[in-house]
Amino acid sequence: MQTNNSTALRLGSIWTFLKAALKGEEQDYTSGSIRRAVFLLAIPMVIEMGMESVFAIVDLYFVGQLPDSQHNIQTVGLTESVLSLVYAMAIGVSMAATAMVARRVGEKDRKGAAHAAMQSLLVGIAIAVVVSGVGLFLAPDILRWMGAEPETVKIGTPYTRLMMGTSLVITLLFLINGIFRGAGDASMAMKSLMIANLANIVLCPILILGWGPIPGMGLIGAALATTIGRGIGVAYQLYHLFGNKSQVSLRLAKWLPDWNVITSLFKVAAPGTAQFIIGSCSWIFLAKLVAETGHSAASAGYQTAIRIMVFFILPAWGMSNAAATLVGQNLGAQKPERAVESVNATARYNAIFMGIVMLVFLFASEWVVGFFTHDPEVKRIGTEALRIMSTGFVFYGIGMVMANAFNGAGDTKTPTRINLIGFWFFQIPLAYLLSKTAGLGPLGVFIAIPVAETSITIAAWILFLKGRWKHVVI
């Protein structure tokens, strides 16, 4: 009887804890249990990033049901590779907003947090408008530059044009969630992605394949479903930001540009954006290399494997985002050693999660890839790619936490330098040598990825231990 009561009490405590994490009750993350702080932030952040990865998986599944799936999957994959540049810019500004808002919240300056949030929105909107214009005009050229075959360019241009032309929606979704995370309001970011995904899941089969009187629009239907879904998520975010329904209320902020704050944001955002552009350009080059050495089947297999991999990496990235918030708020509260302990705990949990995912991919990758494609050659290459790339998953998990720890402190320059050397001066040359010089083709690209990612993580860990990030002022 006593055992049953103890079990009931434990389950009740876990349920109370989960409710607090998902509901988004205001918390002080600069005191109390570090484990509790990590999980209160990580649970909604993991779900949030899981929701972001669902966009890619849902699109991939329904696009894979269309005729001539090789060209359709290749279009989606190559466009997503280029869109990663948009994500990089959005994440860069989002990262700056998270760091600055978290620092102000740690200092108990709510008005300063709201002001930083408003200025980051102005910066993000300005960047997105320019990117959207470029994407609208250069869509077919973008696919050609990525090594797409002429038939893929013909089929995929409308899809790429719509996805690139609606960069503002992507930017706002990332940016506003960065503001919420910096304030410690991770559940709000999670809810906005859940709403966006629900809309996308409902719209994808209707717009891609057709339903009743609604004709199937194929590839362009996938772009419409994703854009509308994300747009609904952004509307939900703005309602809470301007409606005094979140921990950062833009009613407290000034609308006019504050060039001092914008300058500070750019100092953090510019290297932060460069950090992700460096990584994104590396992935673009690798996608191009696979397309050139293995053609459409290899490209489709690789893109399928990448999307499956991202589905699991994004939740791990969500957990690592907890480190950014905890570092920012604890530095603001003048508690650098607590920031270190928070990073170590988050890295440990992330490594365990990614280790489990690695085992799943090593032993069940053929079944996982087979769920998304029935093409034998695409399935074979996708399975091979997923198995090889997953061997570095534990290091990926730790590396994400290290990068976000630097970013949360406002030290975006350090991970940018690491990425520049690790991706451009190591991963790309290695992939080129293995795939072309050594004649391994796409296999050489697959091998280069875990080797480079492991090296990058080791370098980041060494620089984190030196502790220079503790003294960054923003």
Image: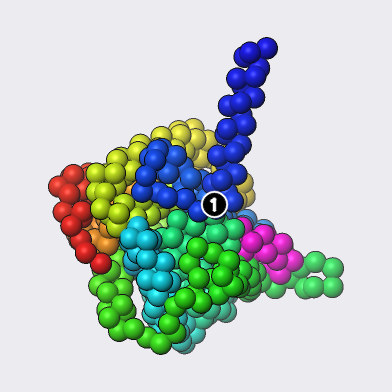
Instruction: Examine the structure image and report whether residue 205 is included in the region drawn in magenta.
Output: yes
Q: Which residue is mark 1?
A: 25
Q: Nearer the viewer, residue 241 or 416?
A: 241
Residue 92 % position (x, y):
35, 68
Residue 474 % position (x, y):
25, 67
Q: Main secondary structure of the magenta part?
A: helix
Determine the residue positioned at 20% across, 61% down.
472
The residue segment tinted magenta is 193-209
Residue projecting furthest to the right: 212
Question: Is 129 left, or right, of 273 in this rendering?
Answer: right
Q: Provide the secondary structure element on which disc 1 rests.
A: loop
Determine the residue positioned at 27% across, 62% down.
410
Asked whether residue 20 appears in the rendered view, the answer is yes
Residue 295 % position (x, y):
44, 61
Amino acid under label 1? Glu
Mark 1 neighbour class, 10 Å CA radius: few under 14, some 14 to 19, many 20 or more: some
Determine the residue positioned at 84% across, 73% down.
213
Instruction: Examine the structure image and report whether residue 255 is included in the region drawn in magenta.
Output: no
